[in-house]
Amino acid sequence: MPRVAASRPGGAPQGGAVSTGFAWTVPAVIVSVVDGDTFHLDLDLGWHVHLQARVRIARINAPELATEAGKAARAFAQALAGEATGALFTGRGFDKWGRPLGDLLIRTGRTLAYDYADAAVRAGHAVAMGTTTSAKS
């Protein structure tokens, strides 16, 4: 079976990815929202190569899906995803389960774009990593 995307040192894929040190940025389509800090994306690696992956959003922690706050966080993410006209994912490595870990920029309309992590924290559906304040319950 051919390899879909080879890795460079630091975990950055080859192909259509734009390398910025250990980060890589690729166009993405939001396939679905798993929970408040995990998305299923179709990552466009370039040269007609796509990778469907569950990605973990860096810098935030959302409540567990089994809680009411977790369900609200997923609904918030689904609402933003539903308005998306495009997205960019900047991978910064992999989490402990091997999922790509990075930032998701969601474009809505022509000019409006949201850094998902910042939007989720501002809306109270996630906390910034390293803080002790809990997300909205």
Image (cartoon, helix red, strand yellow):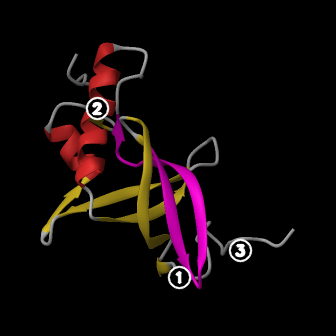
Mark 2 is on which residue type? Answer: Ala
Q: Residue at x 56, y 46 (%)?
A: 95
Q: Residue 49 colored magenta?
A: yes
Above or below 92: residue 6: below
Distance from label 1 to label 2 (Cα)?
31 Å
Left or right of residue 55: residue 128? left
Relative image position of residue 26 (x, y in whole percent): 45, 72
Q: Closer to the N terminus: mark 1 or mark 3?
A: 3
Q: Residue at x 27, y 25 (%)?
A: 72
Distance from label 3 to label 2 (Cα)?
34 Å
Q: Which mark is residue 75?
A: 2
Q: Residue at x 25, y 22 (%)?
A: 134
Q: Nearer the viewer, mark 1 or mark 3?
A: 1
Mark 1 is on which residue type? Answer: Gly
- Image quarter (top left, top right, bottom left or bottom right) of the C terminus: top left
Q: Closer to the N terminus: mark 3 or mark 2?
A: 3
Q: Magenta part of the protein: which range?
A: 39-61
| For the residues bearing labels 1 and 2, Cβ distance under 8 angstroms | no
Q: Which mark is residue 6?
A: 3
Relative image position of residue 111 (x, y in whole percent): 12, 71
Q: Which residue is tagged 1?
A: 16
